[in-house]
Amino acid sequence: MFLYINFPSWIHPQIFPGIKFLSLLRWYGLMYVFAFGTAYFLLRKISNEGMLDGTTTDGKSYKITEDDLFSFLGTGILFLLLGARIGSTLIYDRTGIYWHKPWLIFWPFDGNGNYTGFAGMSYHGGFIGGLIGMLVWCKRHKQSFFKWSDAMVCCIPLGYTFGRLGNFLNGELYGRVTTMPWGMVFPYAERFSSSLEWVQNFAAQIGMDISNARLVNLPRHPSQLYEAIFEGIILWTIIWLCRKHKKFDGMLGAIYTGGYGFFRFFIEYFREPDEEIGFVLGDKTANIYENSSLTNISTGQILCFLMILGGIILAVVTHFLAKKKSNSADN
């Protein structure tokens, strides 16, 4: 009995594999369309509930329009994509090529002129980019940043779910090797020499015959699906249920920031760290393909810890500002 699952052979990164003129249509790109469409649908629902109506920062009464929703979401998405791409190329890439040739950050072709798309998008870079985009829009339109960011985080996690499903369909961002029965053999995952002792031990535990193989593709945690469930569906459900019970503007943004950091921190133990970076804390010589110690910390976990800390600080600050505003109104 095999204690692992083979990645479905009928799933390809291309939506229409084998059709040359449609080869640019990929599931990952389609998932972005679903993600942004979902975000707009939810933002519009929140607007219809009156969550965004009120006054501008200069005290004028204001009614949100359809154009406001489009421009706010569009600005946030643009900055998110810029931040995600810049963060991926300048933080996680260790070749240094993007520092010396920054124009390649947004160049979707390889050295032979073949279309590659923008392979590599950093969540944390996108988080910062989206944050800046929302700040710019709110400043320009004299809107409360904390109120609009609360509305936005009611939309982001469910949209994010589609992004991680796109990663799964692409067979990328898979996790570390595992002996769990739901471990999956991804076709594009790195293969290991069958002569390595740890590879032989893993293969024996899952009933994989590697006696005639030189290189072995071991099953991995489907960490993309873990993230889609916890950082996407569960986090969205928590925030969505809290939206009508929030005590102050900024509360939902704090829940999202801290909640995402919390879930992602632990899921990082199942994700495979970047080979060029490895572990930044703990045993830096440890095998990155297996989880040997909880003290081995990745770059992603450091960033997630900062998000948890940021969420706590945001909750304290916005609560203090709301209380101060309320006391001023009473006086």
Image (cartoon, rainbow, N blue to C red):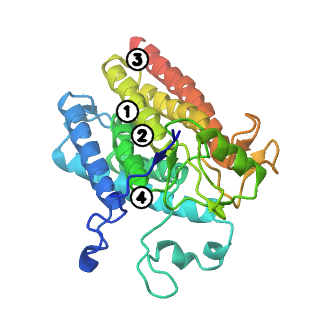
Q: Label 2 sits on what residue type?
A: Ala
Task: Identify the residue at horizontal 17%, vertical 43% (top origin).
Answer: 65
Q: Residues within 10 Å of mark 1 (few under 14, many from 20)?
A: some
**Going by the image, does 325 lie left or right of 270?**
left
Q: Label 3 sits on what residue type?
A: Lys
Q: Residues within 10 Å of mark 2 (few under 14, many from 20)?
A: many
Question: Residue furthest toward the top?
Answer: 330
Which mark, by number, is residue 228? 2
Which mark, by number, is residue 295? none
Q: Nearer the viewer, residue 247 or 288?
A: 288
Eye-nearest disc, 3 or 4: 4
Task: Identify the residue at horizontal 44%, vertical 41% (top origin).
Answer: 225
- Find the distance from the CA under tag 4 to the CA under tag 2: 14 Å
Marks 1 and 2 in Cβ contact (< 8 Å): yes
Q: Label 4 sits on what residue type?
A: Asn
- Find the distance from the CA under tag 3 to the CA under tag 4: 41 Å
Task: Identify the residue at horizontal 27%, vertical 33% (top origin).
Answer: 52
**Going by the image, does 17 lie left or right of 234?**
left
